[in-house]
Image (cartoon, rainbow, N blue to C red):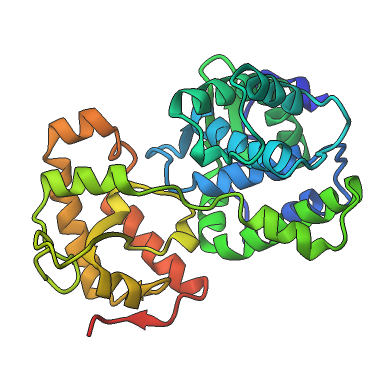
Amino acid sequence: MSHKLRVGELKALYLTEEEVWRIFTIVLTTKSKKSATYKFGLLKAMIENLYQVNEEGKVTYDQLAYSFTKVYWNLVIHHELEQGTRGSAVVTKLMEVKRAYNIPKEMTFDKLDASIQLVAAKRVKAVMKANVFGALYGDTQGSFYAFDHKTEQFKFNKAVLTFMRKYQRLLIDLVNYHMAKMIEQLNDVPHINYLLDKVESIAKRSTLKPFEKVLVQYFEKTCFYCGKELHKSSIQTHVDHFIPWSFVQSDQLWNLVLTCSKCNTSKNDKLAVRSYLDDMIDRNERMINQPELIASKNELVTYNKEKIIHLYDYSIQNGYENIWVPS
């Protein structure tokens, strides 16, 4: 049984888009055996970490476990929804953490203390090793990724990584829909749209205040887009995702800039005109030359300029065609 595997080697180095779509179809529909929503949870974690991989296409178990735990904390604890077989291991681990720290169900994952988040993610990671990594590996015929429990490394097939980045927005919608559809069958809820709202809100952004402090400390206190000075008391400082958060679904320092409130509100969920991409690359090069910043935040380990260029292009392909220019 594939879910019991401790090591999974990549069985296909090259896949066409047609082959990747065919396998995704199997995984997302009833052709794939699913007794719980875990495979959807892992797909959501993979999507959230598409741009956190290193040059070899690898991401750590800890990174995936954090994203996976966020999904299930918000569904199981916050929304009190069943995910499959009663008494499932992930639910058990999360309930243990909830009781140990006396956490109310109203507390979403991003509101938990960082130390509690890590405790929960560590416990869930053990369950993922036993029940999750191997299961999806089997359903994808060993062609999407390789994994190793000993080194706790997960390696994307580069063809699949490119495919998932290219069709990221569509895949998010597909995974959310099929995950919500399965949860609907496991819970007494009024309508699938009720669940879609909850599934889609799982990855809601957390506070950007810690990033604001870092950016203010190491860079000029001016708006990245219009150049307005931000240190004046009359101007409110905002932090903006250069590539919209709704596309990247994560907070990374190399994608964040300081802005004035006018530019941030005007830009909203749009992509800035391409000339700012060069400015972003230059800014990030200056960040790379801040060794104390890298050491303290570990934010640039997986960054390179080709990645943000691809991200910009893929966002346009995924429908972000309403290009924003500051007034």
Task: Please tell me which residue lies in front, 258 or 170.
Answer: 258
Which residue is drawn at the image coordinates 82% and 62% (left, top)? 192
Quadrant of residue 224 within the rendered picture: bottom left
Q: Residue at x 67, y 37 (%)?
A: 105
Using residue 77 as the reference point, say whether residue 275 is left or right of it. Answer: left
Residue toward you, 32 or 320: 320
Residue at figure coordinates x 84%, y 50% from the top left: 182
At 78% from the left and 27% from the top, the residue drawn is 2
Q: Is residue 19 visible?
A: no
Q: Position of residue 99 (x, y in %)?
A: 67, 20
Q: Nearer the viewer, residue 309 or 44?
A: 44
**Relative height, residue 131 to residue 219 (above, below):** above
Where 149 falls versus 91 (above or below)? above
Q: Position of residue 279 (x, y in %)?
A: 17, 64
Q: Quadrant of the N terminus?
A: top right
Image x and y of residue 55, in percent:
37, 39
The quadrant where residue 298 appears = top left
Q: x and y percent of residue 217 in the render? A: 13, 44
Q: In the rendered image of this protein, does residue 326 appear above or below residue 133?
A: below
Q: Quadrant of residue 91?
A: top right
